[in-house]
Image (cartoon, rainbow, N blue to C red):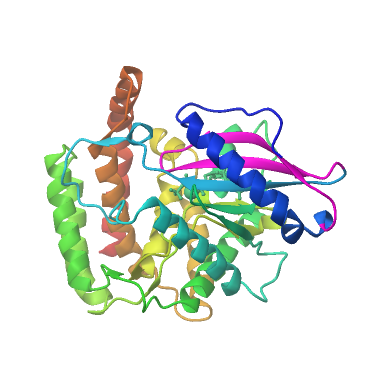
Amino acid sequence: MTSGPSKRESGADSAEADEVVRAFSILARDSAGDWFSCFDTTPVTSSLVKLYARPRCFVYRFALTDGTSRRDVVVKIRHSHETLRRAERFGDRPQLTPQRTMSDRDSAGCEFTGLRQAAQAMDGADPERFGVLRALAWLDGPAGIVMEYVDEPTLRQLLERRWRRALVRRTSPSDEEQTWTALGEWLRRFHAADKGDALPPRMTRRDELVEHVQRSREFLLRAGAEPGPVHRLARTVAERAELVYPVELPAAAGHGDYTGQNVFVGPRGRITVFDPLPMWRVCVYEDLARLTMGVRLLGPQVMTHGRLLDGDLCDRWEARLLESYAGGGHPPAHELHLYQSLLLMDRWGELVGKRPARGRARQVARRVRVRAGSGWFEQQAERLTSLLN
Ligand SMILES: Nc1ncnc2c1ncn2[C@@H]1O[C@H](COP(=O)(O)OP(=O)(O)OP(=O)(O)O)[C@@H](O)[C@H]1O
Ligand SMILES: [Mg+2]
C-alpha cells in the first residue's frame, strides 16, 4: 500500500503520477524483500517522498518501511513532454548527440542495461573508491527503472558549492584528486567492458569528426557567435586532427552523459556513477571531453568568467583523469583537447541556439546568459586553439 504526503513540482501529469505510484506500490509489496535483506519477512508499505519533474524524466523518490527499518528508492520514468524542455531557435543545429532517436521505453531499457553493465565493469573494484548504484527492478506499464536511492551530493553540486566556501565545509584537495583518479579508472573499466560492436556507430571516423566541426563552425557564425575565435578553433581542429587521430578513432560503448551531474561523490572522494545511456559506439574521448568541458562550462564558471574554479586546478584534475584512464599508458592529452574543441562548439551551439520552453522572464534571463556567457566560450576557444598549436 502507498500512503503519506506527496510533494509535486509542476509539470507532472497527475493521472500519470498516480499510475506510477500504484504500479510501484504493487511491485514494492512483492519485491522489497528481494531488494533489501532487512525486509526479508515483514510486509512493506511505500510512500512517495518527492517527485521531481525534469526535462527528460520524472524522478520519484519513495520510502519503503516495515515499521522498523526504512529504505529509500528512486523510480525514474522518461517522458517526452515538450513544455518541460527548452526549444530550438534553429531547426538545423548540428548536435554531437542526436536527441530522441529512441522511444522513452527503449531509452529506459538502455539505461537499465547500462546500470547493470556499469555494476559488472566495477566488479572487484575497491568499494571504498567506487560505489555501485543497484538497478533493483524494471517497472512495467509506465516503463521505468527502480533503483537504490543514494544520499550523496553530485560532483556538480560539490563544485558549485565552492562558491559558498565560507558556509560549507569544503571537500579536501586530496579527496578531490581521489575523485578525479577514480573517474578515470571508472571510465577505463566501462569502455573496456564493452567495445560497442553490437551498437550503431556514431562519429567513429576522423573525417566525420572534421566535417562535424565545419558544420558547427557555420552554425555558430550564423547564430551570432564571435567569428574570430570560432574560425581559429575550427581551422586548428581540422589541421591537427590529421596528425593526432587515426582514420578510425578508438571507440567503445559510451556512457553517453559522463558529467559531474551524473556522479555522486561520497566519503574520501568515492564515486558512484549513474544515468548511463550506452546506445552508441562512440570515440572514447567523447566521455572524457564531456566530463572535463562540462566542469569548465559549469553555469557559475561561465557567468563569472572562471572565478568558480581556477584554471590550474582544472588542468590538474584533467591530468589525474587522463593518467588514470590511460592506466600506465601515455595520457592522451592532445586527443582530449581536440575532442574538447568539439564539445565546446556543441555547448556553444546550445547556448546560442536554444530558448526556454516558456515564460518571458526566462527569455530575458536567457539573453543575459548568452551575452555574459559568450565571452567565456570565446576564452575557452582561444585556450584550446593555443594548446593545440
Ligand atoms: N538513485 C538516485 N538516488 C538519489 N538521487 C537520484 C537518483 N537518481 C536520480 N537522482 C536525482 O535525480 C537527478 C536526475 O536524475 P538523472 O541524472 O538520472 O536524470 P536526468 O539527467 O534528468 O535525465 P536523463 O537521463 O535524461 O539525462 C539526479 O541529479 C539526482 O539528483
Ligand atoms: Mg542526469
Relative to 96, is 311 on the left or the right?
A: right
User: At 50% across and 39% down in the image, what residue appears?
Assistant: 308
- At 14% from the left and 55% from the top, the residue drawn is 215
Residue 184, horizontal then vertical, whole percent? 53, 67
Quarter of the image where the N terminus is located:
top right
User: Chief secondary structure of the magenta span?
Assistant: strand
Image quarter for residue 96? Answer: bottom left
Could you tell me if residue 153 is visible in this image?
A: no
Is residue 137 shown in magenta?
Answer: no
Residue 5 higher or lower than 228, as above or below: above
Residue 307 spot, x, y in % from top left: 47, 37
**What residue is shown at x 32% (from left), y 48% (from top)?**
380
Question: Is residue 62 a member of the stretch shown in magenta?
Answer: yes
Q: Residues in magenta?
A: 40-67
Q: Position of residue 219 (x, y in %)?
A: 15, 46
- Quadrant into which the C terminus falls: bottom left
| Residue 302 shown left or right of residue 234 in the figure | right
Quadrant housing residue 377: top left
> Relative to the observer, which residue lies in front, 226 or 117?
117
Residue visible at 70% across and 56% down in the picture: 31
Residue 247 visible in the picture: yes
Whether residue 263 is situated above or below residue 243 in the rendered picture: above
Q: Is 148 located above or below residue 322 in the figure?
A: above
Foreground pick, 349 / 12: 12
**Horizontal and vertical percent for residue 217?**
16, 51
Q: Quadrant of residue 331?
A: bottom left
Say which of 162 and 353 sits in front.
353
